[in-house]
Image (cartoon, rainbow, N blue to C red):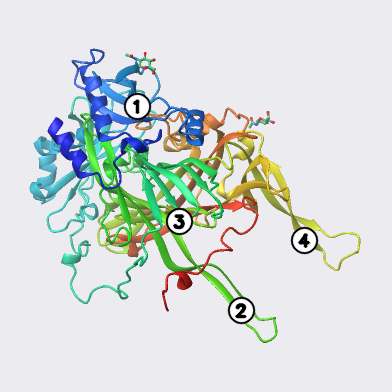
Amino acid sequence: MASVLHLLLLSVCSLYCISSGHRHPLDPLSPSEISTIRSIIKSSSLLSPAPLGFHYVGLDEPDKHAVLSWKSDPASHPLPPRRAFVILRADGQTYELHIDLDNNSIASHRRRSGGSGHPMLNMDEQNAVLALPFKYAPFVDSVKKRGVELRDVVCSTLTMGWFGEEQDQRLVKMQCFVTGETVNLYMRPIEGITMVVDMETVEIVEYEDRVVIAMPTAAGTEYRASRQLPPYGPRGKPVVVTQPVGKGFTFEGNVVRWANWNFHVGFDSRVGLVITVAGVGNGKDDIHRSVLYRGYLSEVYVPYMDPSEEWYFKTYFDIGEYGFASTSFSLKAGIDCPHNAEYMDGYYANGDGSPVLLRNAICIFERYAGDVSWRHTETLIPGRIITESREEVSLVVRTVYTAGNYDYVLDWELKTSGSIKLSAGFTGVLEVRATDYNHVEEMIGEQHGTLLAPNTIGVFHDHFLTYHLDLDVDGPENSFVKANLRTVRAEGGTTPRKSYWTVVSETARTEADARIAHNEAPPGELLFVNPGVKTRLGNTVGYRLIRSGAAATALMSEEDYPQRRAEYTKKSLWVTPYRKSEKWPSGLYADMGHGEDNLAVWSMRNRSIENTDIVLWYTIGVHHVPSQEDFPLMPTLNMGFELRPYNFFEHNPVIGTQPFIKNTGLTR
Ligand SMILES: *[C@@H]1O[C@H](CO)[C@@H](O)[C@H](O)[C@H]1NC(C)=O
Ligand SMILES: *[C@@H]1O[C@H](CO)[C@@H](O)[C@H](O)[C@H]1NC(C)=O
Ligand SMILES: [Cu+2]
């Protein structure tokens, strides 16, 4: 064990190694810390000798005020206590432990009692059940009946949601696919079978082969370059980004500094990339003002719209049920990220509690896509035409997350203007249903999807991505303001105009005031302000949320079980007071949960959110009606939103920027 760990440590010290001089209270757990946690727990008599399954091992973040005091003056404040939070399964029970990493002891442990739901599945237990169908005679018969070779079959574990059952077994469903001639197995589902697996006893507890449906052929499903035949698809000429005078960002441990920004990069096994203590300055002095204490993609909810026996339960909470880390993979240098990118590794604990290296989990790069940061041409001055413009170079932090069939390219883009743009690229393979239909004209009755290829229906579904954004605009005490635009009738005959619009601002006092659905959002600005900080002119400093056009509000009925579990998707925007425990909008135990611990439930307490530490939860989404272009794999669809300074700076912070053409000797 020791030698394995040693190798791990040796191989990864490019950027991510936390050298002792650079420790930060929000650093993710290092591989040696994960190993220590495992051995503390294994050697304790509290839980052993029962076999232990690790379902979450992560940093138990120090109290925010302790982090902020440390950050304001690291020399005179000790690092806050270093602790980990662990969720284990043993003897069919769930345990929550806090581990003190300063003295390697178990600070607290408790057996969970009451409450619905189960911890995230871990990869090892999922792998363990994948072999079950192949030894299960009824399944082998079903495969034979369909004329498929057993050796071409692969299976996957699907979380089964909750539909009002009163039981607390930890179950998953399984679905199998046919590969062999193609690697695009998701296009060849073995339809008509229901298979339920007990994760504790590791056995198939329910099996039904209800109906045999035509198997879609492998034709046209391949996406590998090596399997494509000329003439190849459309393509321009190669573009390579080079940085003739080097990169503009630096690392100090996990703290990244770039232009006028600095922030800390973390990695969590449930949510993946975590950006914390992000601050920005005007670039002229060394003053960094806080913008965001912590931000991450907190849940991905994907319900499918086919109510049939084999499909109704497909209502995934990808992050809360499977976790981010165990379903993300190394980024491909030069393709997933441009040539000028740097990479960071991530670590998580496997089902046995041992550290797993996720090499190149995160990439960071300066993006120049030929865009303009600002420009103006002035023609009114006699005899002169003045054109000034600046290149837009931004910093991108990217992760890619593969939730089984689907891939999400998740970007944080920081701009020198102070903006933060969050975007998600939706790509990967659809979940399709095998069907007997070969032509749209054969399809009768109500439809649950689009015919994408012979015998292949791309089922309607949604993607809801919910971001947790603990904004600290110039400090923690913030308010949420709706600056609504109102039409005013011009009265009194002093103007030929009959109307104009003006801004009427309203500060949200409690959580109820802040909830906004996409379809009920009034025109105007949604602002996060610090009422205690004004510009020299007296405007209140803030950041505004620029909403995405392609937003979606949940369409399922409120009493439907999946919708109760994802109640928070009924609104696109929630603002809650900061609570350390409110991290995951689908609840700590999302798998099979009943929805009693979710963002909507927390918010129903209607707490005060005025001039206090507040958190924005923002959901972007798509109602995905598949089209033939999504077959055999969909081109990336991009969605996002922007957090943009609003009276935060005294003036345009990038006005003094020199063009690169001038100071690098670059020519056209
Ligand atoms: C470890 O440290 C914590 C506080 O830092 C303390 O409360 C706890 O008692 C210590 N445990 C042991 C076993 O020394
Ligand atoms: C929330 O609290 C405010 C202030 O106490 C109150 O006016 C409002 O009616 C409450 N709203 C809900 C939905 O409970
Ligand atoms: Cu989709």
In x, y percent, where is residue 404? 27, 47
Instruction: Assign a secondary structure to mark 3.
Output: strand
Residue under numbered circle 1: 84
Precedes in sequence: disc 3 or disc 2: 2
Left or right: residue 666 compared with residue 570: left
Q: Is mark 2 within 8 Å of ligand 3?
A: no
Q: Amino acid at mark 4?
A: Tyr
Q: Secondary structure at mark 4?
A: strand
Can you identify the residue that label 4 sits on?
Answer: 500
Answer with mark 3 or mark 4, whichever residue precedes in sequence: 4
State the image coordinates of residue 628 (x, y, percent, origin top left).
33, 64
To which residue does mark 2 refer? 386
Query: Does label 3 point to a residue whose CB lies under 8 Å from ligand 3?
Result: no
Q: Are marks 3 and 2 in contact (CB under 8 Å)?
A: no
Q: Are marks 1 and 3 in contact (CB under 8 Å)?
A: no
Q: Which mark is residue 262?
A: none
SS class, disc 1: strand
Three-letter code for the amino acid on which mark 2 is drawn: Ile
Measured in 3D between alpha carbons, the distance from the residue under mark 3 to the one under mark 2, in whole angstroms, is: 36 Å
The CA span between labels 3 and 4 is 32 Å
Q: Nearer the viewer, mark 1 or mark 3?
A: 1
Indicate the quadrant containing the C terminus: top left, top right, bottom left or bottom right. bottom left
Residue behind mark 3:
639
Q: Looking at the figure, which quarter contains the N terminus?
A: top left
Q: Amino acid at mark 1?
A: Ala
Q: Identify which amino acid the numbered label 3 is placed on.
A: Met
